[in-house]
Amino acid sequence: MTAYLITSVSVVGAAPTDLLIRDGVVAEVGPGLSAPDATVVDGAGLVALPGLVDLHTHLREPGREDAETVESGSRAAALGGYTAVCAMANTSPVADTAGVVEQVWRLGREAGLVDVQPIGAVTVGLAGERLAELGAMADSAARVRIFSDDGHCVADPKLMRRALEYVKAFDGIIAQHAEEPRLTEAPRCTRVRSPPGSA
Amino acid sequence: MIKHLLSGGDLDADTATEILDTAAEMATVAGREIKKLPALRGRTVVNLFYEDSTRTRISFEAAAKRLSADVINFSAKGSSVTKGESLKDTALTLQAMGADAVVVRHPASGAPHRLANWVDGSVVNAGDGTHEHPTQALLDAYTMRSRLGRLAGLSVAVVGDVLHSRVARSNVLLLTTLGAKVTLVGPPTLIPVDIAGALAPGTDVSYDLDSVLPNVDVVMMLRVQRERMNDSYFPSAREYARRYGLDGPRMRRLPEHAIVMHPGPMNRGMEITPEVADSRRSTIVEQVTNGVSVRMAVLYLLLGGNNR
Ligand SMILES: [Zn+2]
């Protein structure tokens, strides 16, 4: 049994008070609390908030462990007051199968710092052409309910319609980076320079 | 008796029951050494098929021949239809030939309804577009009644590509008229949002096959074309089969008495596994046999075979 007594802390901006936490649950709130078994944390000048949730995180694992891992991303999130992060699907391989989302979910559990909830890709390989196995990801241990192609965007309106309809079966949602790449592609002027000395 | 059979909704409970009872009498003919009745001798039945469907055409042809009718098979392929003749011109030709009944299969929803305005004979809809297939619904109802002894109060799950299925529409209309309760099951992409209200109030929709199975008397699996996944109605054949296919473990969630139906042709491994298709619950072979009896009854009653 672990207990923490946070003293003189402002709960969501209210007047300072004490906060007793036993086994991860708020047990008591009020001024002048005492608990001999508790570790005392001085909260003067600090604000206590509910755990924050980051709906748009890139944990980069699998594939780019040099940039970030589920463990390092979880650590950063916990330090910033986050208790849950939703990990985008643009890993390598892409999180478009039950296997990959379960891997990310398990790594999150092993890190044990925040809830890591994988986001599944809407389309296979984020390519915007065919639906990924959304139902298999929903039924997996990761229980995926948010699907997104993030910056790759689901630009085909018919595919988007199908995705929106399909996820109704398991109360899923589609998170869209609302951009039509064919409209936003910048016109480029290409110029090939001659090497110095040539003429 | 009605003159045409265009929709499962054309039949009231008494008429539908009369057809099923007549079909039961017709079935006894199949058990005889000479499988023939003289009822429609001298009458002409035209099978007008604008789509390939050997199964349905053969079933109608067998039905008409067992009633001693003259049968003309008019296939759109290699005929004047491919040379651009309109449905109306074809209808006038059939009219001139004195067709007493026209059995029509057409890719356009509503074509049999149009045809019924142009010919004096009876029109039987043998499947139009993604609209209706009323004799399939009748043979399904007949099969349920033979196996389970009744239709009123039955709970029937129709599972799969409801969106493109004429079998599903005709079944909802007919089964509701006969007092059964239908639940349509499939991925939301393949179930039209307004279908329950549009066809028959009281029809349920579910996206979760496993939750429906323990409470049904009949589960009817619809054919699902693999090509639908190219249009993203579902991600893959594997995911479709996993979520909406009927396999052994799912079949064992059904009540002990429940039956499994399929209008054919089956996609084994997609909507149904061989273990289920070949099980004692399966009525798939009976449905084919019953199809001939039911179509005999329909032709017999539409052509007034009972008042001659
Ligand atoms: Zn992003």
Image (cartoon, coloured by chain):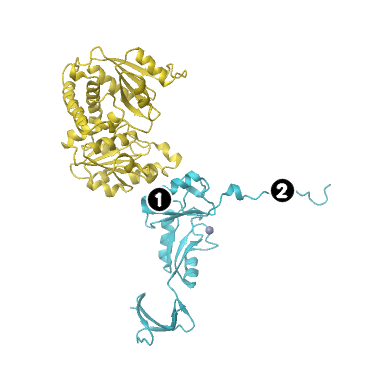
Q: Which chain is cyan?
A: A
Q: Residues within 10 Å of mark 1 (few under 14, many from 20)?
A: many
| Left or right: residue A48 compared with residue B288 | right
Q: Which of A22/B307 is in front? A: B307
Question: Against B99, is B15 above or below?
Answer: below
Residue named by callout 1: A167
Residue named by callout 2: A190
Q: Quadrant of the C terminus of chain B?
A: top left
Q: Are marks 1 and 2 in contact (CB under 8 Å)?
A: no
Q: Which circle's residue, 1 or 2, is located before the other in the chain?
A: 1
Q: Quadrant of the N terminus of chain B?
A: top left
Q: Which of A70/B149 is in front? A: B149
| Left or right: residue B29 compared with residue A82 | left
Taking the spot 43% from the left edge, 51% from the top edge, the residue there is A97
Which x, y percent locates residue A92? 51, 54
| Left or right: residue A50 compared with residue B214 | right
Taking the spot 42% from the left edge, 42% from the top edge, the residue there is B233
Which x, y percent locates residue A130? 47, 44
Q: CA distance from mark 1 to mark 2?
A: 43 Å
Q: Which of B6/B81 is in front? A: B6
Q: Are marks 1 and 2 on the same chain?
A: yes
Helix, strand, or loop for circle 1?
Answer: helix
Q: Which chain is yellow?
A: B
- Please, what is the three-letter code of the amino acid marked with disc 1? Val
- Mark in the foreground, 1 or 2: 1
Figure label count: 2
Taking the spot 50% from the left edge, 69% from the top edge, the residue there is A76
